[in-house]
Image (tube, rainbow, N blue to C red):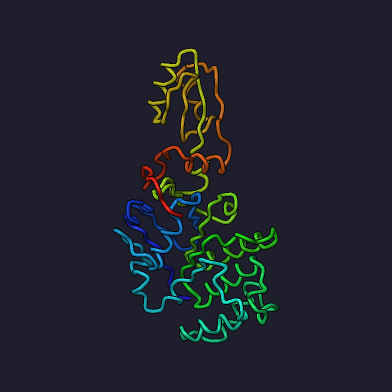
């Protein structure tokens, strides 16, 4: 495998007639870590991945691998390994035959076929017809195809879908191993819970726009805290002076992006006794659901932007 490569998405947009599927999307995926590309069904994930892989032409912006568009790569399979559809294999061919066809077409050493089948745990099923594979086995075959050219970058769409608990544990470790080798790994999912034990960073989109780009720890910090005091005006003043994002309500103040313990410390330093201090959300999943709810998502992270209607997944 050659030197590592970044994925760079810059001001990427795509409209299908009146429907704005992706709008002004910008993020970077770095080598050596697993990045989760997350959002609910209909968020624009699949459209983005298809633009990245040259399957859909952007309306504007760019998506490149180390500054080079997919169609301009000299050896695409050696640069980018993809697994977009677990059911796209010819049902009458064996797994080995399927991979040999691609290896021959891409001038890849035929010995890679058996190596990648072993790598993904399909060696003993290599001569079975794919039509008899379970969904989980087809997911593994998709990974074998993605690894065929020993690529620097892996782009995987919902790779955990259809796997049993053992398979999920296996793929989590497998993705970590690939990243540890210096590869750039981008994994899409509509459920944070499926990938949160696998990914180092998260890029989250909602209705075609970026709503979060950062670490999982930073995502958890986006939870809200309800706080109040007999002297609400003094509390609000202290929180704003500390740089907090505060939404006043009839029942008190809602503070974003600051944990409850720090809010309590701010109030104590200001000499403001509290009558309420309660986290409204707990954990990553709640923060993820907040960002991707039907309400207009808040701006979180360096490249966040407001939503658009009608985005496609």
Q: Residue at x 61, y 82 (%)?
A: 96
How many numbered badges does the structure rendering display? 0
Q: Position of residue 33 (x, y in %)?
A: 50, 60
Q: Is residue 255 above or below residue 199?
A: above
Q: Residue furthest top?
A: 230
- Name the residue furthest front: 17
Q: Position of residue 161 (x, y in %)?
A: 60, 59
Query: Quarter-wise, where is residue 100 in the image?
Result: bottom right
- Please name whichever residue, 297 or 231, is drawn nearer the observer in this view of the structure: 297
Residue 284 position within the rendered picture, expressed as x and y whole percent measured from the top left = 56, 43
Residue at image position (39%, 40%) is 299
The residue depicted at 39 percent of the width and 45 percent of the height is 309
As displayed, is residue 15 above or below residue 275? below
Q: Is residue 224 left or right of residue 116?
A: left
- What percent of the width, then of the height, locates residue 222? 48, 38
**Residue 132 lies in quadrant:** bottom right
């Amino acid at each position: 495998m050659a030197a590592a490569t970044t994925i760079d998405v810059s001001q990427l947009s795509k409209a299908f007639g009146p429907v704005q599927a992706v709008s002004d999307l910008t993020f970077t995926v770095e080598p050596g870590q697993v990045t989760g590309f997350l959002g609910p069904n209909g968020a624009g994930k699949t459209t983005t991945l298809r633009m990245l892989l040259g399957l859909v032409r952007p309306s504007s912006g760019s998506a490149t691998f180390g500054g080079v568009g997919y169609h301009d790569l000299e050896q695409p399979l050696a640069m980018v390994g993809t697994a977009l559809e677990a059911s796209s294999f010819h049902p009458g061919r064996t797994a080995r035959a399927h991979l040999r066809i691609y290896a021959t077409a891409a001038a890849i050493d035929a010995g890679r076929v058996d190596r990648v089948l072993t790598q993904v745990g399909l060696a003993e099923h290599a001569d079975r017809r794919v039509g008899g594979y379970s969904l989980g086995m087809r997911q593994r075959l998709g990974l074998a195809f993605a690894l065929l050219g020993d690529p620097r970058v892996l782009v995987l769409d919902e790779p955990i879908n259809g796997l049993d608990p053992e398979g999920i544990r296996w793929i989590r470790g497998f993705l970590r191993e690939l990243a540890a080798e210096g590869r750039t790994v981008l994994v899409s999912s509509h459920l944070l819970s499926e990938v949160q034990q696998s990914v180092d960073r998260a890029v989250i989109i909602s209705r075609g726009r970026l709503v979060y780009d950062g670490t999982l720890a930073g995502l958890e910090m986006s939870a809200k805290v309800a706080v109040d005091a007999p002297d609400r005006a003094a509390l609000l003043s202290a929180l704003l002076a500390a740089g907090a994002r505060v939404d006043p309500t009839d029942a008190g103040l809602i503070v974003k992006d600051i944990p409850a313990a720090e809010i309590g410390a701010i109030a104590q330093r200001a000499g403001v006794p509290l009558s309420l201090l309660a986290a409204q959300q707990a954990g990553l999943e709640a923060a993820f659901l907040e960002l991707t709810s039907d309400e207009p998502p808040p701006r979180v992270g360096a490249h966040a932007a407001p939503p658009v209607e009608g985005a496609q997944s």
